[in-house]
Image: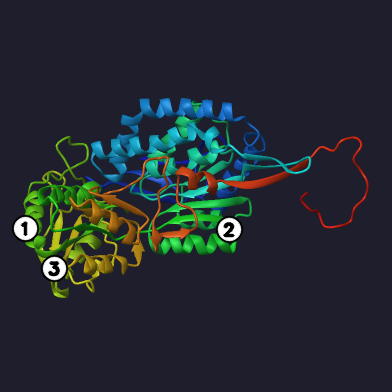
Amino acid sequence: MKTVNHWIGGKPVEGASGNFGPVYDPATGTQPTRVALASVDEVDAAVADAKEAFRSWGQVSLAKRTAILYKYRELLDAHRDEIASLITAEHGKVHSDALGEVARGLEIVELACGIAHKLKGELSTEVSTGVDVSSIRQPLGVVAGITPFNFPAMVPLWMFPVAIACGNTFVLKPSEKDPSASYRLAELAAEAGLPAGVLNIVQGDKVAVDRLLEHPDIAAVSFVGSTPIARYIQSKAVEHGKRVQALGGAKNHMLVLPDADLDFAADNAINAAYGSAGERCMAVSVVVAVGDTGDELVKKIAERAAGLRIGPGTDPSSEMGPLITREHRDKVASYVHGAAAQGAEVVVDGTGYSVEGHEDGFFIGVSLLDKVPVTADAYQDEIFGPVLCVVRAETYEEAIELINSSRWGNGTAVFTRDGGAARRFQLDVEAGMVGVNVPIPVPVGYHSFGGWKESLFGDHHIYGNDGVHFYTRGKVITTRWPDPSDGGINLGFPRNH
């Protein structure tokens, strides 16, 4: 059986705790791999290596840092198919989706390659006679990232390239459910010339997470995952004096106005709800149909859902793969089973689905629930699976009130041909990311990603300008080089003149 170990000090390090976690192939239900689970001592060793590496890495010139990142970008591009295959093997998503994940991660590496522009300071001369004031940004030191199972390559790439480009060193704790992709990212970083200790990976569970949150040498923590864990991460990290960006869950709404192209809206609802088996925080999980659009829209979505090809991610004909674990598959199914009793109409029931030759895999079909009451569990909870709810609203005002009453505010979208309505929506809606005829409005790398309300804990979004600010701190320097004739003692309060 393959074992995924730690990466500490620029080399593989075998797990010493004696504890291991299972890593499944979701398409078959088998366990071909196990992952070492770090002890407190192993986390401490990774942090110690990162702390030692920071002494020199923080002083490395921007030119040398970016040269390494350019080489890293080349290696990731050359190995993108290999990385995607690791994702498919352990997460289950189809290979084309995994390739897309790697591509979006590469965007952030490209952002990091241009870090010199982002770190430019400011200078004001002669703010007072002979006095200049400048501001600069400097790295924090050792920072950590805790990443989820649903994007095992992309989310780590949202974090550590920006952090190390800014001069920090990094300790990554990836999901124990699919750890191989991030491990490969570390190997390629070393091949690109990243010095030992600048990027470290500790595999693990809550023991490793808690130690990173408590460790006195960790200056900041980045997290992407569910809302309950994001809230916990923020609380515990702040308790120990750390800077935190913790991105939580979502219940993303797609508003369809009466003037929308319903075929276009139905296509996009299918793509956004069922892509990656719904295991993404930006998935559309609720369609809000305004006016008399509901019946026709539901019919079109149901017709398209019937034709989706579900199978192992290694099969090029598959459009949707399995879920990450058997337990999660069963939890997703429970929402569909309970929907009718809570007042919803089950239009498409994807539970009980199996794939010939892969009967033990963690497969589930897509489900479509119509006329879902806002009190139903399927509406209230983040299901994180291929379940799409449709709710009805008579007017735009009713729809916007419904969306804004959600406790989450990650992403949202409006489908319309009316520019005025779209503009009004983007100003009215309470969410951090808004799409106009774009169902999954994940920003490009030079804009920041993040939600509002219970979708974000902390003050900074991730990557983009917010990412650079999160991984650095400002310093203001006031300078005077006096003339040899200047001098004298003055105990009064300094004044500008």
Q: Quadrant of the N terminus?
A: top left
Residue under label 1, please give it: 296
Q: Left or right? Give the position of 473 relative to 448.
A: right
Badge 3 element? loop
Q: Nearer the viewer, mark 1 or mark 3?
A: 1
Q: Which mark is residue 349?
A: none
Q: Is residue 356 visible?
A: yes
- Which residue, given by chain and number where applicable, does mark 3 sit on? 371
For residue 31, above or below residue 100: below
The spot of residue 304 in percent (x, y) is: 9, 49
Residue 361 seen anywhere in this rendered image of the structure:
no
Q: Are marks 3 and 2 in contact (CB under 8 Å)?
A: no
Kind of element beneath mark 1: helix
Question: Which of 132 and 295 lies nearest the eye of the viewer?
Answer: 132
User: Are circles 2 and 1 on residues that touch, CB within 8 Å?
Assistant: no
Q: Is residue 468 above or below residue 351?
A: above
Query: Residue 128 versus residue 56: which sits nearer the camera?
Result: 128
Q: Residue 369 appears at what percent x and percent y?
A: 14, 63
